[in-house]
Image (cartoon, rainbow, N blue to C red):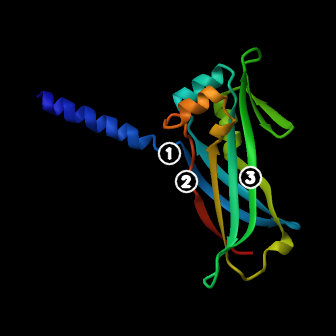
Amino acid sequence: MQARRFLALVGVLLFTLFARAENIEVRSANITLREDTYALDADFEIALTPTLEDILGKGVPLNFLLELELIRPRWYWLNDRVAAVTQQYKLSYNSLTRQYRVSLGTLYQNFASLGEAVRFIGGVRNLPVAEKSALQPGVSYQGAVRLRLDVSQLPKPFQITALGSREWNVSSDWYRFAVNP
């Protein structure tokens, strides 16, 4: 009887370990031409770990880094990198106003709940990627995008704690998609 309980406990632990392996999931991503610029639209589903929610509530800001690469595959040589874009989002909590703030450079927006703030970060719209002249019509390109917690922006004690911990390493896998101008 104890062996069954032990096996059931091990099964539950393994399930939770693998279920939490990826805390950010890319739902969709595409690059489209808007006037004279190609722009990225992407949707991410972000699930913060309880540890990250706790330190956020204690006033430690979290920095998320969106990374995008646009390449032209070549069979005869190395791939040609057409564009590389990074964008940083800073998520913070103000305990006096009880609001969450998402900063994008000098611009910011306040939110009443953590869920709203995280959904805002996860909904990327009209991010400029490349000028119209950078992509040739009729040529196939490949885009790759990911969103991750930038652990290097955390205070030093948290960086040390985050080195080998899954609770701190929140990231999506690279999501690859075709771009056909």
Tell me which label, 3 or 2, sits earlier in the chain. Answer: 3
Numbered badge on residue 136: none
Residue found 33% across the figure and 40% down from its top: 14
Q: Residue furthest top?
A: 96
Where residue 19 sits, quadrant-wise, is top left
The image shows residue 6 at horizontal and vertical percentages of 20, 31
Tell me which label, 2 or 1, sits earlier in the chain. Answer: 1
| In this picture, residue 82 sits left or right of residue 48 | right
The image shows residue 49 at horizontal and vertical percentages of 53, 32
| In this picture, residue 43 sits left or right of residue 38 | left
Q: Is residue 121 above or below residue 138?
A: above
Nearer to me, 60 or 44: 60
Q: Around disc 3, counting alpha carbons within 10 Å, would you say few (fewer than 14), some (14 to 19), or many (20 or more)?
A: some
Tell me which label, 1 or 3, sits earlier in the chain. Answer: 1
Instruction: Look at the image and tell me in which quarter the N terminus lies.
Output: top left
Q: Residue furthest left?
A: 1
Q: Around disc 1, counting alpha carbons within 10 Å, would you say few (fewer than 14), some (14 to 19), or many (20 or more)?
A: some
Amino acid type at mark 1: Glu
Instruction: Please report contact status of discs 2 and 1: CB closer than 8 Å, yes or no.
Output: yes
Q: Nearer the viewer, mark 1 or mark 3?
A: 3
Residue found 58% across the figure and 53% down from its top: 27
Residue found 55% across the figure and 53% down from its top: 173
The residue wearing badge 3 is 86
Q: Is residue 173 above or below residue 166?
A: below
Q: CA distance from mark 2 to mark 1?
A: 8 Å
The residue wearing badge 2 is 173
The image shows residue 76 at horizontal and vertical percentages of 62, 85
Amino acid type at mark 2: Asp
The residue wearing badge 1 is 22
